[in-house]
Amino acid sequence: MMRPLTDFTTITVLGFGLTGVSCARYLLSQKVRPVVLDSRANPPGATDAKDIADQCECYFGPFQLEHLLQSDLIVVSPGIDRRDANLQMAADAGIPMISDIELFAWVVAVPVVAVTGSNGKSTVTELTGHILRNCGMNPAVAGNIGVPVLDYLTNNSDNDCFVLELSSFQLELVESLKLKAACILNITADHLDRYDDERAYERAKHRIYQHASMCIWNRDDEKTKPVFRRRGMSKVSFGTSDAAQGFALTRRADGLWISWQDKPLLSVASLPIQGMHNVQNVQAAMALAHGLGIAPVEAARGVKGFKALPHRCELVFEHKGVRWIDDSKATNVGAAVAAIEGLRPTVPGRLILIAGGDAKGADLGLLRPVLAHVDVLITLGRDGSKIAELKTGARQVQSLNEAVAYAAKHCTDGSMVLLSPACASLDMFANYKERGMKFRAAVEAYYAHD
C-alpha cells in the first residue's frame, strides 16, 4: 500500500496500550491528529500518556461501528482480535487495516532484520543487537520487545539498522516490510484462542518471509522452511545436526562447536547461555547479523558477554548444589518442551518442574513425552490439573510458595527446580514477569527460614 499519511483524512488507532500510544505519538509528530479507540473504559494510555490522549480524539468503551466506518485507515494494536464483529464489518467495507510495523515499513530508511517464532524470539532479538553492537554497529532493538518501533522514528534516533521481534499478530497486518534477513525460529501450537486453527497461526508467521532478501529457517523444525523462492532471495538454515551448509553443530575431540559452512566457529561450552535450545538461538542471531553484512566469524566473537534475559531460563538462586531456574516466559507448550529438553542434559540430580496456568486452548498432551524426563512434577493454576494428569505422582498445589516448598523437600544434590509453566500467567498473575518475580521471592523467602 505504502501511501503518504496525507492521503488519509481520518486515521484511527485501535487500542491505547503501549503500542497504541506509540502510534498516536508518531502520528501527532507527523501533524496527524488520530482518532483513538479502545474497548476498555480506562485503557493504560489514558493515564500513562494523558498528554497524548489530550491531543487526540478519544473514545473509550465498547467499539462503535460508526467510528470504525468513518476511518480511512485503521492502525490495529496486536492485542486486539480482528475477529471482532465490528472490525469484520469495517474490513468488509474495504477500510484498510495495518499494524504499527506496517506504518514503520512505509518510512524506515535503514536496513532491517526481524525474527519471529513461538519461542526464543526475545533472546534472539536481544542477542542479535548485542552482536551488532560488538561489531561496531548501532542497532535499534524494537518491536514486540521493549520500546515500540515507532518511538525510534518519533525521537529521530541515529540508529544505522533495526532488529525487530515480531509477533504473529503484528505480522497479520504487514504487507510491505522489506527485510535484509528474516528468521522463523520455530513453530509450535500457540495463541489458539486468537486463531481458528494451527495452520492460520503458521501462515501468519510465514508472512515475515514475503519481502526478505535472506530467509533463515530451522532445519530441526520443517514448519519454518520457506515454501517459495523469489529472484534474489537466499536461504540460510541452522540446527543441531552436523551439516556442510548453513549454521550447524559439529562434534570435535574437544566437544561440540557451532559451525558455519563446515568450519567450527564457537565452542558450545563457551556460550554465555546454556541449553540446546539456546545453541539454536545463538545460530539464528549470528545468521541475522550475517544478513546485515557481519561475517559469521566476526559474529561468533560478538556473542561474548551476552547475558540471559530475565525469566528465560534465568538462574535466580543456587543453594547447596541445587539450581532454581526462572523460565516464566515459557507461556506455551513448545517453550516448556524446549527448556526441558535443553536443560535436562545439564542436570546430574533430579529435574523438578513447576508448570501450569492458562493453556489458552493448547493441546497439553504434547507435554507427555518430555515429562518422562522430569523426576518431580508440580502443577498449579487453571489448567494445572490437566498437566498433572499426564504424569503419575504429580503434585497439585495452590500457590507458588507451596510449589517452592514442595520442590525444596524433594531436591537431591545436583538437582534443578525449573519454573517453565507451558501456560500463560493471567489466571493468577498480572503477567509472566510478575510470575517470575514471585517465584524468585518465594525461593528467597523459603531459604531465609532454612
Image (cartoon, grey):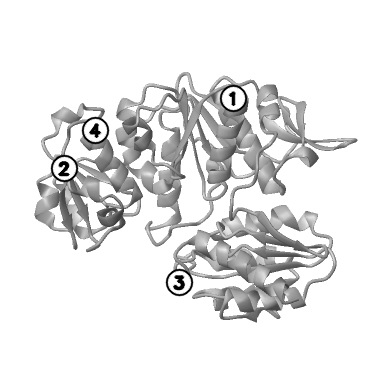
Q: Which residue is mark 3?
A: 427
First of labels 4, 2 by sequence position: 4
First of labels 3, 2 by sequence position: 2
In this view, the mark in front (3 or 4): 4
In this view, the mark in front (1 or 2): 1
- Secondary structure of residue under mark 2: loop
Name the residue: 39% across, 37% down.
149
Image quadrant occupied by the C terminus: bottom right
In this view, the residue in front, 188 or 71, is 71
Where in the figure is residue 68, as x and y percent of width and height? 14, 50
Q: Quick check: can you spot residue 185?
A: yes
User: How far is the residue under mark 4 from the one under mark 2?
Assistant: 27 Å
Q: Which mark is residue 208?
A: none
Q: Quick check: can you spot residue 391?
A: no
- Secondary structure of residue under mark 1: helix
Q: Which mark is residue 290?
A: 1
Q: Which mark is residue 29?
A: 4
In this view, the mark in front (4 or 1): 4
In this view, the residue in front, 119 or 192, is 119
Name the residue: 79% across, 67% down.
350
